Image: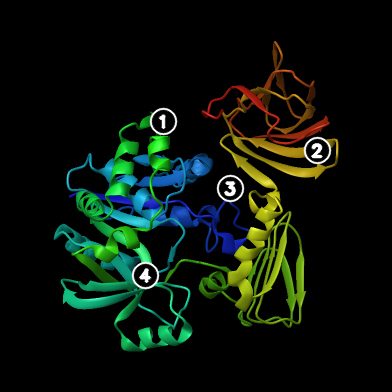
Amino acid sequence: MKIVPVILCGGAGKRLWPLSRELYPKQLLPLVDDRSLLQNTVLRLKGRYDVGNPILVCNEEHRFLVAEQLREIDTAPETIILEPVGRNTAPAIALGAHQALTQDDAILVVLPSDHLISDNSAFLRALDRAITLAEDGHLVTFGVTPTRAETGYGYIKTGNSLNGGNEVKAFVEKPDSKTAEQYVSSGDYYWNSGMFVFKARNFLMELAKQRQDIASAVENAFKTVSQDDIFTRVGEQAFSDCPKESIDYAVMEGARKAAMVPLTAGWSDIGGWQALWEVSDKDGNQNCIAGDVITENVSNSYIRAEHRLVSVLGVDDLVVVETADAVLITMQSESQSVKEIVTNLQNSDRKERMTHRKVFRPWGYYESIDGGDRHQVKHILVNPGASLSLQKHEHRAEHWIVVSGTAIATCGEDEFQLSENESTYIPIGTVHRLANPGEIPLEIIEVQSGIYLGEDDIVRLEDNYGRS
């Protein structure tokens, strides 16, 4: 029987702002080691069972970032399904289930891409038990053995024992502190992990039984799929018409054969800065330090410097996070409220909620390093063999200076090579393209000048990545 990982790559990670941004969210970040949370999730099942290539579900904006992170860990996906809009976990999992139906009796292992599991051996042992229950027709979730009376998680109430697990009596919402203490002391409640194991066909049958509206919308969306290399696009209108609903509400709460397998494996959803501090390595003063940081008389704090020296003196229980364009300072106890800052940024139409100063593209990245009313300076890196779109700008001219590598520049009707320390000028309205024909990254400094310098002043005429 084929085991098919379905990795859910949605979510914006607002509580980890300013490190996590809407266009580069927490699942793509290396928060606890050298790999991103997404990469660690994909590798969690590699080499075990009869595991097929993973199916990933993500949005259009993240598709090239997700594909690149898979390439870095030498993993080929079965496909990356692109959601036209976010519709919560039940429709997203249904997309993965339809994709997996091509493999008879495929068992799905549904994993969020932004969770941490520090003891992978313990997770795999629990997964063995979950697969056994799924083979018997159960829809299985993992219940994390609680270590404290946590009010930030939903809970699962267990029932009679099964082979390696328990029946699920109920899914309950995030409790207040007194109720959480009662849950933990009873021994009958577990944290809801949001991870699941079941046959693809069984899940879709149960979804159709309980939420025919969701089942029909996803099925209709899958009838008009189109393939773009490793990406699968589903019917936009049909999927947009699908109701938003979580798998807990849509399926698991009403499923007759819902089961739970206990999990004690160092799990965390890293739902905020305090949670990240809890799972990170600490010094003798219980500080987690990342980057160029100097501390004096500091304790119980998370301090992260991304671009410059950060000095912290005489504080306790603090979160300090520095990025190129934003700094967060908060008490650990208040760190769950960081999402309110993101809401404020959204209401003010501030770009800091969306992107970092370094913006990744399918060809590489650019980083804004200076700017004014009529000029902007960028550092651009183009990966070997990659190229930007053939494009023009209505309101700005550009100067390119090659710092390292070799460029092929298109400017109007001319195409020519630029080497290190050479430069060229692209007038306003001129069709142009930048490409890297070499085997090392191409780095240039781009100086833009004009009356408008926004990223939407790009008219793409031809693009290797299917962008309009």
Which amino acid, by three-letter code, is at mark 4?
Asn
Q: Which of 447 and 422 is in front in this view?
A: 447
For the rendered model, the colour scheme is rainbow
The residue shown at (58%, 71%) is: 336
Relative to 39, is 48 on the left or the right? left
Looking at the image, do the residues carrying marks 1 and 3 touch, with CB atoms under 8 Å apart?
no
Amino acid identity at mark 1? Asp
Residue 274 position, x and y percent, is: 57, 73
Work out whether residue 76 can be spotted.
Answer: no
Which image quarter: residue 48? bottom left
* CA distance for labels 2 and 4: 47 Å
Q: Quadrant of residue 348?
A: bottom right
Callout in the foreground (2, 4)? 4
Q: Which residue is labeled 3 in the image?
A: 23
Say whether disc 1 or disc 4 marks the residue closer to the N-terminus. 4
Q: Is residue 373 above or below residue 257?
A: above
> Which residue has dot 2 on it?
376
Which class describes the residues within 10 Å of circle 1: few (<14), some (14-19), or many (20+)? Answer: few
The residue labelled by disc 4 is: 192
Q: Quadrant of residue 383 in the image?
A: top right
Residue depicted at 17% across the width and 62% down the height: 132
Disc nearer the start of the sequence (2/4): 4
Task: Give the CA distance from mark 1 to mark 3.
Answer: 22 Å
Considering only vertical position in the picture, is 92 above or below 159? above
Side of 207 relative to 132 (left or right): right
Q: Quick one: which residue is furthest to the left in this view?
A: 136
Question: Dot 3, how many residues are within 10 Å of its Cα: few (below 14), some (14-19), or many (20+)?
Answer: some
In the visual, does 98 lie left or right of 13? left
Labels 1 & 4 near each other (Cβ < 8 A): no
Q: Earlier in the sequence, mark 1 or mark 3?
A: 3
What is the residue that sits farthest to the top in this orientation?
A: 413
Image coords of residue 163 (percent x, y): 15, 71
